[in-house]
Amino acid sequence: MSTNTDAEDIIATASDWLARGERVAVATVVETWGSSPRPAGSQMAVSETGRIAGSVSGGCIEGAVADAAKAVMESGAPQLLAFGVTNERAWEVGLACGGKVSVFVERLG
């Protein structure tokens, strides 16, 4: 996974994958409440071959977002994902102080 978090670089990387003939989806953090490892606007690109650039959570929801991205690449239908956790379960899933995050996933191209 890339540690690059600049949105322009993530879109440039995703566009490169697209130009090489891969299907690509981009996930964007659209809203956060409480503790969130990444701010609104953070992005992650996922290619059909499993390449990932960027981050929407620092790791705690990336797997679920990548799975949703694969479904979005297949169907073409965007998805709005919502993740939330109580303070009691926060450490188990990586959101250290609890919180919620909404992530919009769309197919590029």
Image (cartoon, rainbow, N blue to C red):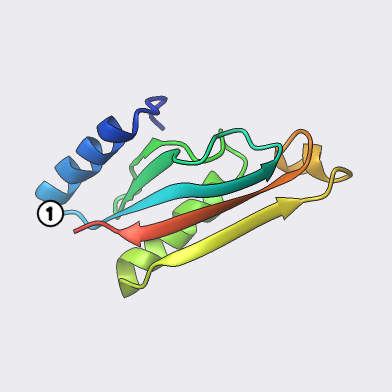
Residue visible at 50% across and 63% down in the picture:
80
Residue 96 percent coordinates (x, y)? 76, 33
**Along the line of sight, which residue is nearer the eye, 49 or 98?**
98
Residue 93 percent coordinates (x, y)? 72, 43
Q: In this view, does 97 lie to the left or right of 42?
A: right
Q: Is residue 99 left or right of residue 39?
A: right
Above or below — where is 41 with respect to 3? Answer: below
Residue 106, picture quadrant: bottom left
Residue visible at 35% across and 28% down in the picture:
6
User: Which residue is outermost to the right?
Assistant: 88
User: Looking at the rendering, in which quadrant would you find the C terminus?
Assistant: bottom left
Above or below — where is 45 with respect to 25? Answer: above
- What kind of residue is marked 1? Gly
Residue 62 percent coordinates (x, y)? 53, 45
Crowdedness near tag 1: few (<14), some (14–19) or many (≥20) residues, C-alpha within 10 Å: few
Above or below — where is 103 with respect to 35? Answer: below
In the rendered picture of this protein, how many numbered marks are placed on residues?
1
Residue visible at 12% across and 54% down in the picture:
21
Residue visible at 78% across and 42% down in the picture:
98
* Residue that label 1 marks: 21
